[in-house]
Image (spheres, helix red, strand yellow):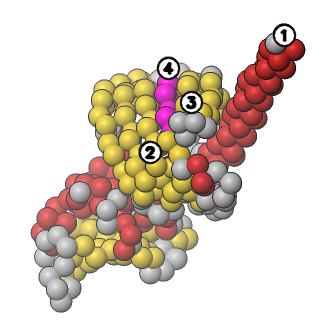
Amino acid sequence: MKKFLTVLGVVVFSLVGSVVFSNQVIKTAVTVVASKITGAPVHMDGFSLNILSSTIRISGFKMFNPDGFPAGILVSCPKIKVIYDCASLFKQKRHFLIVEIELKEMGLVKNKEGKLNVDSLTIAQQSNSSSPIPMQIDILTLSIGKIVYKDYTIGAEPSVQVYDVNIQKIYKGIPSAQQLALLVLAEPMKATAIKGAAIYGAAMLTGGAALPFAVAATFIGKDSVQQIIDISFEHVYKVSLVVVERMGTITEHDASDGVINANINGAMVALILRKDADNKTEITISARKYMFPRLDIAGGVLYQILDKLQ
């Protein structure tokens, strides 16, 4: 009996040790991948994978500012819970049934050069972004707390604005790790009046999973995106005018012709609305900066327009 208890104790200790070791290995791997995808340091206080309940729990997830910005936290998520499909653990494409993210605070920073920390992340730069890491998230619940915005373009001391968002949003069908990261970064910014399009453009170019219309979005040129939606011309034009005015400076607009021209992030942006044969509205947006095509900016404008039309 004594021998049996000794053997049982060794087995239990080994199992516990192997679980702790595997959790630490996975935690390190997830941290490395998240840092690589975003282009910013990432840290987790805790990580646990429970095979019996098919649940992953992450505590104290933090993403820090990228290079070129004051030291500080960009995203703070005290709790992340994932319920996964066990059968997908050994497949290249992981299947997550439910993902719950509690985003307590987001720290937006505009540095002295006028660049936003979110727009300076690797994931926001289309040319530098890594190949998509495939996954399937059936349902994502994102709880957003507050946003603290610091603007260093004013002087030595930044101006500070706090936005208490306090909302919860639900999304379906997220296809990649990049899209998940972009959604978590872009969604909180919608509650602010900050002019910027790079992060929205990146979200649109990687699939726009948060938007119901985005499945049909097409890229018709190096500088242009196009979308057809079943919403009246008048309403789409009105919403487009508000969005473009918020994002930049309107240089020309004509409701009768469905034309809006603007300067956004230093790029010349042209938006054209047309009614098609089925009385649906076609949106075409092009953007160029110093004569070079900026599909990311065009996509960013479309992303925000579609979001307002939901």
| Residue type pointed to by label 2 | Ile
| Vertical comparison of 141 with 6: above or below | below
Separation of marks 2 and 4 at Cα, in angstroms: 42 Å
Q: Which mark is residue 2?
A: 1
Counting labels gives 4
Q: Earlier in the sequence, mark 4 or mark 1?
A: 1
Q: What stretch is highlighted in magenta?
A: 77-82
Q: Residue furthest top?
A: 2
Q: Which mark is residue 98?
A: 2
Please identify the quarter of the rendering in which residue 226 is found: bottom left
Q: Nearer the viewer, mark 4 or mark 1?
A: 1
According to the picture, the residue beneath numbered tag 4 turns out to be 157
Sequence-first disc among 2 and 4? 2
Mark 1 vs mark 2: give the one in front. 1
* Residue 250 in picture, x, y percent from top left: 29, 59
Q: Nearer the viewer, residue 76 or 254?
A: 76
